Image (cartoon, rainbow, N blue to C red):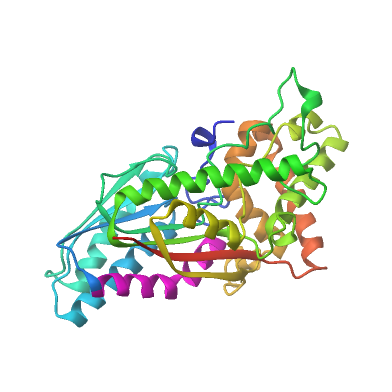
Amino acid sequence: MEVMRVLRMNKGDDENSYAKNSKVQSKMISLGKRINEEAIMQMLCTNIPDIMGIADLGCSSGPNSLSLISEIIDMIYAKCRDLGRPTPELKVFLNDLPCNDFNSIFGSLPAFYDELRKEKGSEFGPCFVSATPGSFYGRLFPSRSLHCVHSSSSLHWLSQVPPGLESSARRRTTTMNKGKIYISKSSSHGVLEAYSLQFQTDFSSFLKSRSKEIAAGGCMLLSLMGRRSPDPTTDDSCYHWELLAQALMSMVSEGLVEEEKVDSFNAPYYGPCVEEIKTEIEKEGSFIVSRLETFQIEWDGGVDDAGTTFGAQSRGQRVAKTIRAVVESMLEFHFGKDIMDELFKRYGETVEDYLSKTGTKYTNLVISMVRKG
């Protein structure tokens, strides 16, 4: 499975779209707001360039994309006013894989620009928004062209399935993760090591690329799924994948899905612990960590909108829709489109039963760092 070609959030605005089912991701952005604001304020106290480059890596589509950029612009505008300085020209780059639904973002830009003019007036520095398709595990921008880089709900996705986990028709007996689609409590040491090494490789490449693109004194703001324990088999790290595997295996038992299909699918995902993040940052050596904090998030993002269609559903249904909006493109590519409705119906029921017995939550890691001079 080529992650760059297959991984994308569900397009459009129907009931299974990412735009309608991204409450967890919105919650992650809101939890990082205080840390992001602190980092941006510190950067602007040191230097306000005439032209400021801002990049959102893994921007996806839907309401979260431009709302995050709006927040960053608000912070810059407020600080410049406090300092009696004109706001710089802003170059905003929205990055995601080429199959992302960039068109939906472009359709929202006229309203975004109108709101900027309405709120901040004609003297607000010009803002230019453009798209930069490509993998953030390599170079995307010219050297020293960025001053603020943000990425939320993206860095837990790996550049590829860890080598050695994918089976082929000729090597069925070498499947290392039989009956599972990610790390689980029954995973062998080889599976755990393969995932850990792939994350180390990817995050190191990410840091090296950004170290060349971010100007000295610039800030980088990261938010991703992770875990509190060094143990990668803890429930907060992997159990949502375990339940999806259970739903698939229930369909295997009824002859609806081939067992070999489950055995040969492994999620290109990894939720690191704090120590793993720190180790790679220290090894790369170009950044100083300002903050590294963990937050807990309900699997459905927490319900504060019971009056909406999403809020009126059961917790299991809400979680199933949230996960479906994110992983359906990969599952459909591997298993086919026909099983998706039944799979996520079963997944929702399995999640509902699980959450009725446990208080498991996601762990969100939020990191702010500064590019060394």
Q: Is residue 257 magenta?
A: no
Q: Is residue 32 magenta?
A: yes
- Camera-nearest residue between 271 and 263: 271
Magenta span: predominant SS is helix
- Camera-nearest residue between 13 and 319: 319
In the figure, residue 23 lies in which quadrant? bottom right
Above or below for 334 versus 283: above
Identify which residue is drawn at 79% across, 55% down.
350
Q: Which percent across, then down, holds residue 11?
A: 48, 45
Q: Residue furthest top?
A: 170
In the figure, residue 66 lies in which quadrant? bottom left
Above or below for 16 versus 81: above
Above or below for 74 versus 13: below
Residue 21 seen from this side: no
Q: Quadrant of the C terminus?
A: bottom left
Q: Which percent across, then down, holds residue 306?
A: 61, 72
Q: Residue furthest bottom?
A: 82
Residue 34 seen from this side: yes
Q: Which percent across, then down, holds residue 75?
A: 30, 73
Q: Which residues are magenta?
A: 21-45
Q: Which percent across, then down, holds residue 193?
A: 69, 43
Specify whether 272 is left or right of 153: right
Identify which residue is drawn at 74% across, 60% down.
235
Q: Quadrant of the N terminus?
A: top right
Number of numbered markers: 0
Identify which residue is drawn at 69% across, 35% down.
265
